Every structure is written in structure tokens, then in C-alpha cells.
Image (spheres, coloured by chain):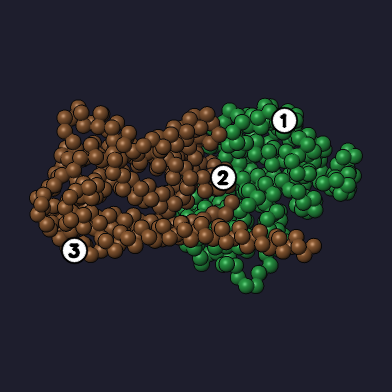
């Protein structure tokens, strides 16, 4: 009797130790990356970085102001291209498409597009926007990111809408409200904070995509005006600077990596704070 | 919790009796059959529900009672794969020919688990059916909300906290809030699907008293798995078993002198 008990104890402890070890390894990878980037990037962060344009090749100094603005500009355009379609698609899946064949197809397609390598998205946007226009542009970059955003937004919207229990929809329908009003005026407001959180997280994911921007937005060492010119962005700058032979550029690449990381971190923390206020309905 | 520490025993509202709402000639079900996919849930249900009376539907779990009342306001259509054959007449009109949205304004429903809209205050919850159907006048909304809360015997407890979220109330209060919300759109008929099964006995007795009060102006159909509750509140009782309507008649008669042996077995607790 006691040998089985001791054996069970041993098995319990081993399992706990192993899983705990894996958790520690995961966390330490995360903290290692954070620490490494912060260590290398923090010393290169200065006011110039945020306000100045890149200096000519070979000269030291300058900054990445245009890349920071460019990243925001591209995310903005991606939102306009991808969020309406993505969010409406998510609403369709959660409200009309449950259990239907059409719903299954939409969900499956979204998952497949999600799995397509981002560089293929870049090639797609290149073929569809850059080639006809005959030059790189912020428009092409925004479209590439926007298409990537669609399936992500669909899934996150659907996920948060599914959290709203059926009882709420039924109560609203039983009051004699048409279905679209139930969705628009009852279900979506109930899930609103979750939906916003989802959108924030989706945008932060897309903000770090490099491959689709390589030959759509391409890059720009100056301020990019309008939407028809190539535009700089943080991920592409990191790529360009990191593989260069200049020490100063390497330092700036670290700084850019830190800024990008901080952007993602702040977005995630903001999303968490938002979610804490989200109405959580126990079905 | 917004409930006052000492629960005041419910007294009849000291306000003048509520104005008569649109009354109906009752509901008639004619050979109603319902399928969920291939599963035949209701079999040839035919019964007449009298206006301004409480009709209880009793029966063991899974016998189709909830399905039946959901057919009355066409809520069964919300479930994919649901199909109904037969007729349900509301004041002589076939409900399948009516606009479901308008039908549901005439036939209100209260569910088992009270579900106030979480993003809305108590006032907004009760006003939801009115506001979302286009009523804008705040004065009109206020008076209708007050009237509905009074009819649901909740006004005294919440009149000072109307802007607090609906989810801050106790279970019994939330259910009365849902009843007020359903009453606000002035239905003629109120369907109640096991409204007290999630409530403690005190809250339950308050709602039962409320039902007895409401039947002066509304036709009420209540599904309950609690036979004593059916005996307490209803005028007529229907006994369902495995999708069939076994017996339907005057409550006193069903509980003291049932005609069918299966009814007697259920009522005396030989199965359940």
C-alpha cells in the first residue's frame, strides 16, 4: 500500500518538476531576449533617434523618426484595409455562421490565409499594387499588412463574440428585436472591450511584420509624403541596419528593436488593462 | 448586492391597479410537432390556453415542455435544425404567418437564468425593449420603466439606484428585473421557462405572488419542474411526457384526481 503511495508521490513530484522546468525555460527565453535587446538598445536610445532622419551612409548619428512615423502610418492603412472586413467576418462567423457550411468555409479559409508565409503576402501585394504602379509605395505596404490583418481580426473578433452567452441573445430576441439590432446594440456592446483588445493585439502582431514590407513599402531615407511614395518602417530598418557593415548602424538597429519591442509590450499591457474592465458574463 | 438587509415581505402594490394591457383571446396549439434535426421532440400537441389565466406545464426533464413554449414565440427557430409542423394560433392568427419580431413583442418570455444585459443600468435594461424599438422620449421611457418595475414588484427596491448596473442585484431581483424588462413592451402573453429554478425559496415565493398578481392582466404560461409550484400558482396544468401531452385540465383536478395513470405516477413521485 505504502509503496504504491510513495511511487505515486514520486511520479507527482517528477511531473511537477519537469513541467515547472519547462515553464522556467520558456520564461527565461523571454526574459533573455528582453534583457538582451534592452541592454544593447537602451544605450543607443537618445532624443536624436526619435526626431532625426537617417544620416547618409557612412556618417554616424541621425535617427529613425521617419521609420517610427512610417510604422504607425502603415498600421493605420492596414487597419482601414483589414479591420472592417476582418471584424465583419468575425461577426458573421459568431452570429450567423455557427454550424453552417458557409461558416466552416470562411473559418477554414481564414485559418489557411493565416498560415501563408508573410513573404507570399508581400509578393501578392507586389504583383497587384507595385507592378501596375511601377513604384514602391506606402499604399502597397498598407495593403499587404491589411490583407494579413484580415484573418487575424476575423478569428479574434469571433473568439470574443463567442464569449457572449446565448442567453443574452435569446433575451434580446424575446423582447421583439430584429436580429441585426440584437447583434449591433446588445451583443457587440457586451463584448466591446474584448473586441477592442483583440484589435489592439492584432495590430501589434502585424506591426512587426517585415517580409511583406521588403518589396512593397520598400524603405525611405527621408520623410515619405502621401501614400504613393515608398515609406520607411521600423522592422525594415532593423533588417537593413543589422546586416550592414557599420557599427553605428548596428547600435541603431538595436535601439529600433527595443522601440518595436516596447510598442508591442505597451500594447499588450494596455490590452490587459482593458480586458480587466471587460464585462465577463458567466453563462 | 443592492438588496436591503431586511427583506420586506411583499405587500400588494399600494398604487392603483395597472391599466389593462392588450388582452388576447388565448393561444391554441393544433397538432404541433417539432423536430431538432431528426429528433422528434414534440408529438401532436393540441391544447387551448385560456386568456388571463396561469397555465402550468409540468413533466420530467426532456419531455419537451421548454420546447413547446419556445414554439409559441418562435424562439425555437433560433436553434439551427429546428422545424415545427402544425399550427399555433394566437387570437386566431397562425403565428407562422406573423412577423416573428412583432410576434415576440406580443408574447414575452422570461428565462430560467435571469440575464440582465450586462452593459446596461437597471433603467436601461427595462427600457431596452422600448428604446431599441425606437422610443426616444425620455419622459415616456421613465414612466413606462417605473410602471413595469412596479408591476414586477421591484420598484421600491431599485427606485433610488436605477443607474446602477443590472448585474449588481441579487438573483431574485435580477429575475424580477427580467420580468419588468419583458413587461415593458406590453405583451399580452408572458411565457416563463422555469423562472424560479435558480432562486432560493424566499425569492421564489415573491415571484409566485407576482405571477398571481400579473394574471389579472396577462395570460401566463409557466414551465416548471416543481409540481408544488404548479399546484400553487396555476389554474390549468398540462402534463408532458417524452414529447406527448398526456393530460391537460384544471389544476385542482389534475392534482387530486388525475385521469391518466402516468400523470398519477408522476405526481405521486413514482418517477421523475
Q: Where residue B93 sits in the image (x, y, percent)? A: 62, 30
Do pointers 2 and 1 mark residues of a single chain?
no
* Nearest to the observer: residue B152 or residue A143: A143
Tell me residue A245's x, y (percent): 17, 50
Mark sitting on residue A166: 2
Which chain letter matches label 2? A
For the question of whether residue B130 can be seen, the reply is no
Q: Residues at marks 3 and 1, common chain?
A: no
Image disc number at residue B40: 1
Mark 2 Cα within 10 Å, few/some/many (few <14, many 20+)?
Answer: some
How far is disc 2 from disc 3 in space, using C-alphas? Answer: 52 Å
Q: What is the secondary structure assignment of the residue under circle 2? A: helix
Tell me the mark number nearer the camera, choosing from 3 and 1: 3
Q: Who's brown, chain-wise?
A: A
Cβ atoms at labels 2 and 1 below 8 Å apart: no
Q: Residue at x 42, y 40 (%)?
A: A154
Residue sitting nearer the eye, A1 or B263? A1
Q: Which chain, by letter, is green? A: B
Q: Identify the secondary structure beneath mark 1.
A: strand
First in sequence: mark 2 or mark 3? 3
Q: Nearer the viewer, residue A34 or B245?
A: A34
Q: Mark 3 falls within which chain?
A: A
Residue at x-position 73% and y-position 38%: B64
Work out how far the residue at label 3 is from the one at label 1, CA to CA, in angstroms: 73 Å
Q: Nearer the viewer, residue B50 or A16?
A: A16
- The residue pinned by badge 3 equals A46
Where residue B147 appears, x then y in whole percent?
55, 56
Q: Chain of mark 1?
A: B
Amino acid at each position: 500500500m505504502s509503496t504504491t503511495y510513495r511511487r505515486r508521490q514520486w511520479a507527482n513530484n517528477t511531473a511537477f518538476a519537469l513541467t515547472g522546468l519547462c515553464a522556467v525555460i520558456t520564461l527565461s527565453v523571454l526574459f533573455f531576449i528582453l534583457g538582451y535587446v534592452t541592454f544593447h538598445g537602451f544605450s543607443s536610445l537618445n532624443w536624436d533617434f526619435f526626431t532625426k532622419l537617417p544620416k547618409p551612409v557612412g556618417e554616424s548619428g541621425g535617427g529613425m523618426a521617419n521609420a517610427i512615423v512610417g510604422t504607425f502610418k502603415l498600421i493605420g492603412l492596414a487597419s482601414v484595409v483589414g479591420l472592417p472586413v476582418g471584424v465583419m467576418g468575425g461577426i458573421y462567423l459568431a452570429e450567423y455562421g455557427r454550424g453552417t457550411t458557409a461558416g466552416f468555409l470562411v473559418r477554414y479559409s481564414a485559418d489557411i490565409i493565416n498560415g501563408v508565409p508573410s513573404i507570399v503576402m508581400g509578393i501578392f501585394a507586389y504583383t497587384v499594387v507595385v507592378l501596375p504602379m511601377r513604384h514602391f509605395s506606402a499604399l502597397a505596404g498598407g495593403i499587404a499588412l491589411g490583407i494579413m490583418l484580415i484573418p487575424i481580426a476575423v478569428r479574434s473578433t469571433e473568439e470574443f463574440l463567442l464569449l457572449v452567452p446565448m442567453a443574452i441573445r435569446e433575451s434580446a430576441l424575446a423582447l421583439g428585436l430584429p436580429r441585426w439590432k440584437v447583434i449591433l446594440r446588445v451583443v457587440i456592446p457586451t463584448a466591446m472591450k474584448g473586441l477592442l483588445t483583440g484589435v489592439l493585439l492584432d495590430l501589434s502582431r502585424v506591426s512587426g511584420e517585415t517580409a511583406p514590407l521588403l518589396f512593397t513599402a520598400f524603405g525611405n531615407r527621408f520623410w515619405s509624403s502621401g501614400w504613393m511614395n515608398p515609406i520607411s518602417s521600423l522592422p525594415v530598418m532593423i533588417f537593413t541596419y543589422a546586416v550592414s557593415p557599420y557599427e553605428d548602424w548596428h547600435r541603431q538597429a538595436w535601439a529600433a528593436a527595443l522601440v518595436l519591442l516596447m510598442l508591442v509590450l505597451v500594447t499588450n499591457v494596455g490590452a490587459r488593462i482593458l480586458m480587466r474592465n471587460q464585462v465577463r458574463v458567466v453563462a | 448586492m443592492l438588496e436591503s438587509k431586511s427583506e420586506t415581505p411583499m405587500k400588494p402594490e399600494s398604487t392603483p391597479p395597472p391599466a389593462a394591457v392588450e388582452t388576447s383571446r388565448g393561444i391554441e396549439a393544433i397538432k404541433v410537432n417539432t423536430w431538432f434535426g431528426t429528433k422528434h421532440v414534440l408529438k401532436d400537441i393540441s391544447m387551448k390556453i385560456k386568456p388571463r389565466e396561469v397555465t402550468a406545464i409540468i413533466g420530467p426533464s426532456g419531455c419537451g415542455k421548454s420546447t413547446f413554449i419556445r414554439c409559441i414565440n418562435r424562439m425555437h427557430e433560433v436553434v439551427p435544425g429546428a422545424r415545427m409542423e402544425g399550427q399555433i394560433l394566437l387570437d386566431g392568427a397562425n403565428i407562422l404567418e406573423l412577423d416573428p419580431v412583432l410576434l415576440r413583442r406580443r408574447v414575452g418570455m422570461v428565462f430560467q437564468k435571469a440575464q440582465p444585459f450586462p452593459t446596461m443600468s437597471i433603467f436601461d435594461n427595462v427600457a431596452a425593449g422600448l428604446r431599441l424599438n425606437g422610443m426616444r422620449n425620455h419622459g415616456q421611457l421613465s414612466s413606462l420603466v417605473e410602471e413595469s418595475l412596479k408591476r414586477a414588484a421591484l420598484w421600491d427596491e431599485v427606485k433610488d439606484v436605477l443607474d446602477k448596473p443590472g448585474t449588481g442585484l441579487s438573483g431574485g431581483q435580477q429575475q424580477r428585473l427580467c420580468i419588468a424588462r419583458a413587461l415593458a413592451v406590453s405583451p399580452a402573453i408572458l411565457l416563463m421557462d422555469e423562472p424560479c429554478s435558480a432562486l432560493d425559496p424566499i425569492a421564489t415565493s415573491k415571484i409566485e405572488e407576482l405571477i398571481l398578481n400579473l394574471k389579472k392582466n396577462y395570460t401566463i404560461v409557466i414551465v416548471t419542474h416543481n409540481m408544488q409550484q404548479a399546484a400553487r400558482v396555476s389554474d390549468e396544468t398540462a402534463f408532458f411526457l417524452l414529447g406527448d401531452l398526456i393530460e391537460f385540465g384544471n389544476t385542482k383536478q389534475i392534482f387530486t384526481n388525475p385521469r391518466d395513470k402516468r400523470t398519477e405516477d408522476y405526481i405521486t413521485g413514482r418517477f421523475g
